[in-house]
Amino acid sequence: MNKMERYLDSGAGKKLLAGLYRADDATRQKKRYMDVYREFKEHFALDSHAPSPVFLINVPGRVEIGGNHTDHNNGMVVAGSVSLDAVAVCAPVPNGIITIRDTAYNETIKVDTGDLNALPEEEGTAGALVKGAAAGLRNRGYKVGGFNAVLHNEVMSGSGLSSSAVFEVVCGTILNALYNNGEIPFGVIAEVAQHAENVFFGKPCGLMDQMACAAGGIVFIDFKDDRSPFVKSVPMDFNKSGYSVIVVKSGGNHAALTDQYAAIPKEMKSVASFFGKGVLRELSVDELLAKASAVRDKCGDRAFLRSLHYFAENRRVLSELKALESGDMNSFLKLVSQSGDSSWRLLQNVVPSGDEKFQDMGVVLAVTELFIHEKGRGACRVHGGGFAGTILAFIHGDDAAAYVTMIEKITGKGSAVTLKMRSSGALSVLI
């Protein structure tokens, strides 16, 4: 019996799996953990300095429950960690080289911690994210060193569940466990992860994804001070609400859409700049409306509409928080529907600009809305960045099987994934 098997068969290991996954998925997950450990032992078997100790790392994906495209303008969000996650087995090595075997992509990533400078030619690569996470921690005064790791990430790329953020937080959590005694606050790991994606990887993004993955549970995050966001845990067990949380892959492709994602914060900030401000959070909707004509002339109608979405969405987040805290599911679901409507009409991140033929996300949302209307309960909305990727649906447990059957006839078998909301964020366990 190896280290991983002993841990998973212990009381602590059984409790971990029960807390992270649905009961009908526990057996598969145990095998998955065993496979990752086995590959770690096999892949690094030639290392004569067989590293010890060995850590198990787990980082969840996240769903954006409320606050679509608000974080990059210092807004507010509600997010939650989910059962789709990344699992890694890792151990330190003395040579300063980070080696990560990514089984999902069948690639091995190597980074020398002796050279952690951002390079333009590395933008868009996994190595850039690893390097950025390590550089960010070192720049903040934390210890950084080499390690070997095998990673299996079930958070689908392009899913809207933050696969890149999960990967970044995995890197930070490994360095925290191996070299910093687990003492780095989750907020710092999240901030370093965002910096890695913005500066080293070259993709503009807010901090919500990384913060939600690192913190865990259902959280309210206020980015008014984006250097030190306010994070509040929402004490609600969503799994007892009677509703299933389902993400549906629309079939759309994120390729070539980076400019459309980037245009959203750019246009919002252009409106803020019109008023001499950096972000919309520094304005009020009354100020915007008072100069609506001039803003439209200078920044364009889409920027104006997207700004209206921002202010309405921020208010909605506070209402969603109140509904969740009080367990008022009916009010919460109405707010989710309103958010989805605002994202489609005002934010305009459902249909890629100028694309008449491929409107996958719009189709999936429209069909889901018809299903919900027929049943008289539930809610759905665009999830994450939009344009492609996934939608998020809250479907009553009694309707969930019928919904999955219906929607997969359109989107393909396996495209609808029912999630468990989990209470924990990034984890590290000595095995």
Image (spheres, rainbow, N blue to C red):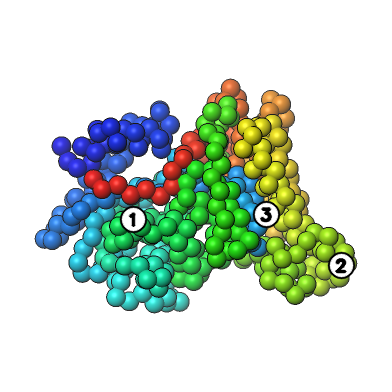
- Which of disc 2 and disc 3 is earlier in sequence? 2
> Which label belongs to residue 291?
2
Give the quarter of the image for residue 100.
Answer: bottom left
Determine the residue positioned at 68% across, 67% down: 279
* Left or right position of 344 against 145: right
Q: Which residue is mark 3?
A: 349
SS for dot 3: loop
Nearer to us of marks 1 and 3 is 1
Q: Position of residue 418 (x, y in %)?
A: 51, 34
Q: Which residue is mark 1?
A: 182
SS for dot 1: loop
Q: Amino acid at mark 3?
A: Asn
How dense is the environment of label 2, judged by Cα within 10 Å: few (below 14), some, or many (20 and up)? few
- Measured Cα–Cα span from mark 1 to mark 3: 39 Å
Give the quarter of the image for residue 424.
Answer: top left
Determine the residue positioned at 87% across, 64% down: 290
Q: Position of residue 179 (x, y in %)?
A: 28, 62
- Camera sees residue 413: no
* Left or right position of 164 against 234: left
* Cβ atoms at labels 3 and 2 below 8 Å apart: no
Give the quarter of the image for residue 16.
Answer: top left
